[in-house]
Image: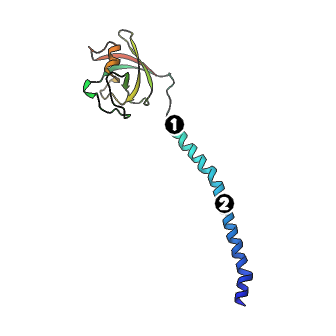
Amino acid sequence: MAKKYLIHKILPVVKNNLFFLHAQKDRFVQMKKPAVILLLLVTLASCHRKSYTGRGSETGIASYYAESYNGRKTANGEIFQSSDMTAAHKKLPFGTKVKVTNLANGKTVKVRVNDRGPFVSGRIIDLTRAAAKKLDMVTAGVARVKIRY
């Protein structure tokens, strides 16, 4: 009798519950996919850096790197070369193009930020020797500049 009861009463209930749980699992997985995609999109969107659209400017003192930095890695991993038109800035994102104007003579140069610095109080940008040469500031070592990004 117990065997008959088990087969006719309990087994169908267990089968139905297993089927229900399996169906619920599939439903949960189907509901989970959009949530995972949404979470992924939100995460990727939050990683996007603020882009500088040519609306910012600063005025201050610029300096240039010493030749001894040639061959060393910059903060973004590139190898520093004093012949490149690059610069170091404390906050601008790597890759930002900056127009630097020497306020004493009006000469300008465009550089790309690929390093962090300068670490001397009062200075706003460090240039490569090539960029400093175009601004005619190599002899003085520093110059009052306006940067636009």
Q: Amino acid at mark 1?
A: His
Q: Residues within 10 Å of mark 1 (few under 14, many from 20)?
A: few
Q: Residue furthest left?
A: 68
Q: Residue at x 44, y 28 (%)?
A: 95
> Position of 39 compared to 81: left or right?
right
Q: Residue under label 2, please give it.
A: 26
The residue closer to the viewer here, 111 or 57, is 111
Amino acid type at circle 2 is Asp
- Where is residue 125? Give x, y as percent: 36, 23
Which of the two marks, 2 or 1, is nearer to us in this view? Answer: 2
The residue under the point 29% across, 24% down is: 65
Q: Which mark is residue 28?
A: none
* Mark-to-mark CA distance, 2 and 1: 34 Å
Viewed as shown, does residue 7 lie left or right of 52?
A: right
Residue 63 vertical position relative to residue 104 in the rendered view, above or below? below
Q: Quadrant of the N terminus?
A: bottom right
